[in-house]
Amino acid sequence: EISLRESEERFRFIFEHTGTATLLVDKKGNIKFANQMCRKLFGYSTEQLKNTPWHQLASPETVKKGRVYFNKS
């Protein structure tokens, strides 16, 4: 239990402080969490982004160029 908690804390720290705008989405593609860089880039809070479909934030050109990565697993 302690190891799991420590692992989650490390993940949360890395997720929040990475220099890349990063989203966590559910299987339907709706945003569940947005890191600090993503909030800064789009100018929204996590609560404002929550449950928004991720593709609404990316331009078609960005998706076409492969700059948005989506793992459906």
Image (spheres, helix red, strand yellow):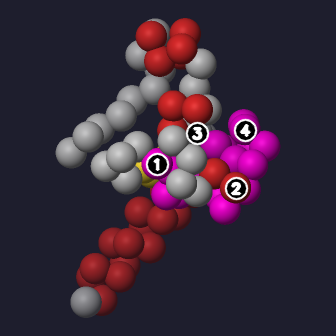
Give the residue displayed 65% in from the left and 58% down from the top.
Answer: 46
Element carrying mark 1: loop
Q: CA distance from mark 2 to mark 4?
A: 11 Å
Residue 47 percent coordinates (x, y): 66, 62
Q: Nearer the viewer, mark 2 or mark 4?
A: 2
Q: CA distance from mark 4 to mark 1?
A: 16 Å
| Kind of residue at badge 1 | Asn
Q: Nearer the viewer, mark 4 or mark 1?
A: 1
Q: Are marks 1 and 3 in contact (CB under 8 Å)?
A: no
Give the number of the disc on residue 30.
Answer: 1
Q: Magenta span has 35? A: yes
| Kind of residue at badge 2 | Gln
Q: Magenta span has 45? A: yes
Q: Point out the tag, 1 or 3, that comes first from the N-terminus.
A: 3
Q: Point out the tag, 2 or 4, that comes first from the N-terminus.
A: 4
Badge 2, how many Cα within 10 Å: few under 14, some, many 20+? few
Element carrying mark 4: helix
Q: Is residue 37 visible?
A: yes
Report whether 35 appears left or right of 43.
left
Q: Are marks 3 and 4 in contact (CB under 8 Å)?
A: yes
Badge 1, how many Cα within 10 Å: few under 14, some, many 20+? some
| Kind of residue at badge 3 | Ala
Report whether 40 appears left or right of 67.
right
